[in-house]
Amino acid sequence: MAGRIETVAPGIFPSKLRPAANPAYLIPRPRLTVLVEASTAAPLTLVVAPAGSGKTSLLRSWAAETRMPVAWLSLDDEDRDPSRLWSGVVAALEGVAPGVGAAVGDRLQRPGELLESVSALLDDLEARDHAPSVLVIDDLHLVDETEAASASLSLFVQHVPAWLRLVVGSRRLPHLPVHRLRARGQLGEVRFPELRFSFDEAAALLARLAPELEQDVVAEVAARAGGWAASIQLAALAARSAQAQGRPYVPSRDDERTHLEDYVWHEMLDQERGDVVDVLLATAVVTRIDAALAQAVTGREDAGTLLALAEDRGLFVSRIEPSGFEVHTLVREALLAMLAERTPERIAELHARAAEWHEAHGEAVPALEHWLRAERPRDALRLLAAQAPALYDAGQESTMLRIVQELPESVATDGPDAMLEYAWCHLLVDRQRFVALVGTLRRAERDQLGVDATWSARLEVLESIAATLTGDWESSAALARSALRTLGDTWWLDPLGRFTWNMIARDVALSERWDESSYEAREVSSALSVVPDRRIALEGSLALAEALAGRPVDALRLVAGARQASEHANMTILHTEALTAEAVAHRELGDAPIALPLLARLADSRIEPAPHCQLLALLELVQVRLVEGNLDAAEEAFGRATELVDTEMPGPGARTWLGRAGASLSLAAGDLDGARGWTTQVVDPFWTAASTARVHLAAGEPGLAADALKSAEPRCPRHTVVAHLLWFRAADARLADEHLAAAVQEAAGLGLVQTVADEGPDVVDGIERLAWRVPVPWLDRLRRAVGAQAVLGAPADVIDDLTERELEVLRILPSRLTLREIADELFISINTLKFHLKVIYRKLGCTSRAEAADLARSMTSLRRPRQAPSTRRR
């Protein structure tokens, strides 16, 4: 078979990436290999039939004979987690498309990025010039029940490149767009009727498995098997067992004895050694088992030897690694049924032993599964609470959610610690449920006397996190500090106490008051220096802090470090905050083409523990769309942000963010009453003054704007720039230029471009008068930022006379870009631009660029008129 795997992704068994050799007793079935070969002319081939029908054997035979390179992936129960499933797919594809793993990097491990990762994988595969190859995925029925897995697989099979064909083995029709592919002629199928052994094939197989059988017995068994491969093999084992005892084999006609459990117990195991049977029964609780795990589960030091003996005796045991084994699924299920019938109490004990072994070896996911099957949810809760951050950052969000949903709510009543752990386990997978549980815990604590002070402090940590999730940064920090006072100097030893300083840092960042030279910042950095993983997590908050405070260059420097740290430590929240900081910083620097895709990606991502990033991205998109002059798109983004705040983040911090954006949106639409309404929701002292001043300026009331600005106390460089720019617009001529010069000096020194451009054409025109005092690179960025945004105002009849290209030219005329620079911005020649200008001057009744620019500045929207919305939320 072509395309063998030389390297394997971490956590992927090498045996899963290659087909095992078929047993020597299997008879050739060339009609089926020819059928599969013909079916692979379609992009997708399904081999679908019940268990024990010979699907895998057929695929192995075909893979050994085809001339096409074949990548192979055998799935098991652990692949139900989508990130693990796709890690296996990528590892398999490395055999036919080396280096394909680089297309997705570590994105598979990040919640919310699965479909993006699959798209990136498809793009990489599509770009390759490759000979026809095949990817075989066996036992798909084990994984495609989950919505995330089925959605990602559907995306993959519909867009797989022409050179790659998929062959899928499954016990049932998979959750893929089968009917659509069939209608398009893009589906090949091999089903049970084709896989069914003919009478002659069944007789030939029985003759190989049990050559001493009489022909009439062979005929009877072959007929009764109904073409089912597993039944044929089990019948042959029963015949061999009877012959070994010196008695004739007579097939049972009793319906009860035709059940698989009867075959396995009475015909296969009845005459086997007791120790072999005991090991098979005990290890049936585990899908894949090595010698050490077998010893732990069975309590026998010779468990591995007995499994090897079972393999030698043909008891459906296969060796998968030098010391690992796997029992045929049908037989294992039958063994479990027997165990449940004969000694049901033993099943829980065996699962508990398996859980203890997996937990001791750092394998949290199988340990959690076994604790649940052992009917010990308290142990499952304990382990999940301890491993939740690591599992989440490893991309196991789906697994965590499933485990949480399987935990009975009664487990939370098993003592105070269980109550905290139960709430904590919901944080990363269901933040609304987490917030509700924390509220329930606080009410329960108030009803009880004598609650342990440490327990109460740990609850305050959860309340601090809940406060941030609901948009109340200030309360979050206060609760964290309160918890620290109780926990004392050993705060960093407490599993929850470790998060306190990160919550304080996030408040400083989101409140726009980070200054690394301040006592507050030094306090945070010093405290977290004793907890390496929490210090790494701080990098994302610091990058976001610098971006929001108005230091975009410093923010991008920190983003580079945070990105490296997130890739090394694989921390999802760190990565998300760093990505948000990167988007905000690039937009501030005037790099909208870089910022916009990042903002769109964040706005569409629901990262449960970081809703502030999604909200900030949505509100930044509101500003981006306003700059473009696209009120419809701005209102759409604002509506999504409003829903997020109203339903999940009603706190004053988030409400302030929303109120600021709502006021800007209303002012852009000429709705002064709406702007006043949104300003009342801004509770931050600085932004209350700034938003109020903007409304007064829009209403032509500079005196009232100046009165409002008197209470504006900047907390960061961005505040300082905004305050000076607003004072420039509100103050008399004598002081206005002093404020503008101060704003330009601060903004140019830090690279603040968009903050200045957003204040409007009056500010930009004023800066042009100071051009000789302004750094040229910064002024160029400002001019480009202004040139890229839509200008305010235009009568509908004037707009209707202009083509879309003429509108684009008119939008940019008020900027200070040269004609050559405008042509470059629009990707047209200078002669084409001059032609458009002549037409624009004629339509507008102008004779120069200056007159056209003045008219453009008086317009309210350089885009096609639309019907104004009838209502706006406040």
Image (spheres, rainbow, N blue to C red):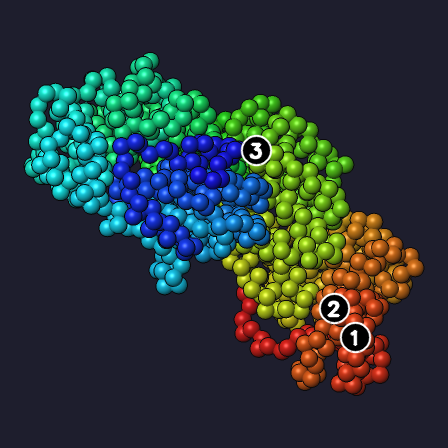
Which image quarter is the N terminus in? top left
What amino acid is found at the position of numbered circle 2 in the picture?
Leu
Q: Nearer the viewer, residue 273 or 508?
A: 273
The residue that disc 1 covers is 833
User: Residue at the spot x=72%, y=66% of the render?
Assistant: 789
Which circle's residue, 1 or 3, is located before the other in the chain?
Answer: 3
Q: Is residue 764 left or right of residue 548?
A: right
User: Residue at the spot x=10%, y=20% of the render?
Assistant: 246
Q: CA distance from mark 3 to mark 2?
A: 50 Å
The residue that disc 2 covers is 826
Which circle's residue, 3 or 2, is located before the other in the chain?
Answer: 3
What amino acid is found at the position of numbered circle 3 in the picture?
Phe
* Residue 254 in view: yes
User: Residue at the spot x=52%, y=28% of the render?
Assistant: 495
> Is label 2 in a helix, a strand or a loop?
helix
Question: Which quarter of the picture shows residue 350?
Answer: top left
In the image, is residue 781 above or below residue 398?
Answer: below
Q: Residue 501 in the image: state x and y as whole percent.
A: 61, 33
Q: Residue 317 in the image: state x and y as whole percent.
A: 30, 27
Q: Check disc 2: other Cα within 10 Å, few if <14, some if 14-19, many if 20+.
A: some
> Is label 3 in a helix, a strand or a loop?
helix
The residue that disc 3 covers is 499
In the image, is residue 67 above or below residue 217?
Answer: below
Q: Nearer the viewer, residue 762 or 552?
A: 552
Q: Assess whether mark 1 and mark 2 are in contact (beta carbons under 8 angstroms).
A: yes
Question: Which quarter of the picture shows residue 591?
Answer: bottom right
